[in-house]
Image: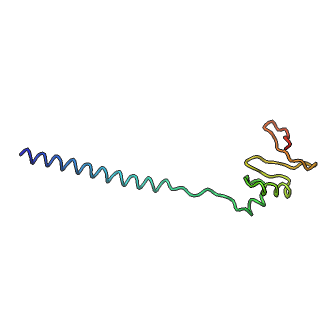
Amino acid sequence: MTNTLLILFLLIVFLVILSLSFFYSKRNKRLARKTLTSPTYVPFLKEQEFNPDISTDNWDLHKLRLDKFRRSQYKGLTFFVSSENRIYYLSEKGEKVYC
């Protein structure tokens, strides 16, 4: 009698562990599907070339846009070309800082 109860108890524990592992594996698969991210939008080089308001890290493109539009965004900061052909940007206080 005690052997039968012991086997029954072990069988119940085994089934509980099996069902919990099945539940968590399904849950993890669902979470993995939700966390897929789309790649960030990177403008094409031609689009960057014709729009000086798009920030760039490309120094050559920055210089080209300064020549063409007399302003360009480089690494998040907008640079301008003055009437004396000097390059400057505006500080937080609104003052011109010449490079």
Residue 92: x, y in percent? Answer: 78, 37
Q: Nearer the viewer, residue 98 or 34?
A: 98
Residue 10: x, y in percent? Answer: 18, 47
**Residue at the image point whose x is 5% and y is 46% from the top:** 1
The residue sitting at the left extreme is 1
**Residue at the image point whose x is 26% and y is 49% from the top:** 17
The image quarter in which residue 66 lies = bottom right
Q: Is residue 77 left or right of residue 87?
A: left
Q: Nearer the viewer, residue 10 or 58?
A: 58
Residue 43: x, y in percent? Answer: 69, 59
Q: Quadrant of the C terminus?
A: top right
The residue sitting at the front extreme is 60
Q: How is the image coloured?
A: rainbow
Q: Is residue 74 left or right of residue 2?
A: right
**Residue at the image point whose x is 74% and y is 55% from the top:** 58
Q: Is residue 91 left or right of residue 42?
A: right
Residue 63: x, y in percent? Answer: 82, 55
Q: Image height check: is 40 above or below 77?
A: below
**Residue at the image point whose x is 77% and y is 58% from the top:** 51
The number of numbered discs placed on residues in the rendered structure image is: 0
The residue sitting at the right extreme is 84
The residue sitting at the bottom extreme is 46
Q: Image height check: is 6 above or below 22?
A: above
Q: Is residue 67 left or right of residue 32?
A: right
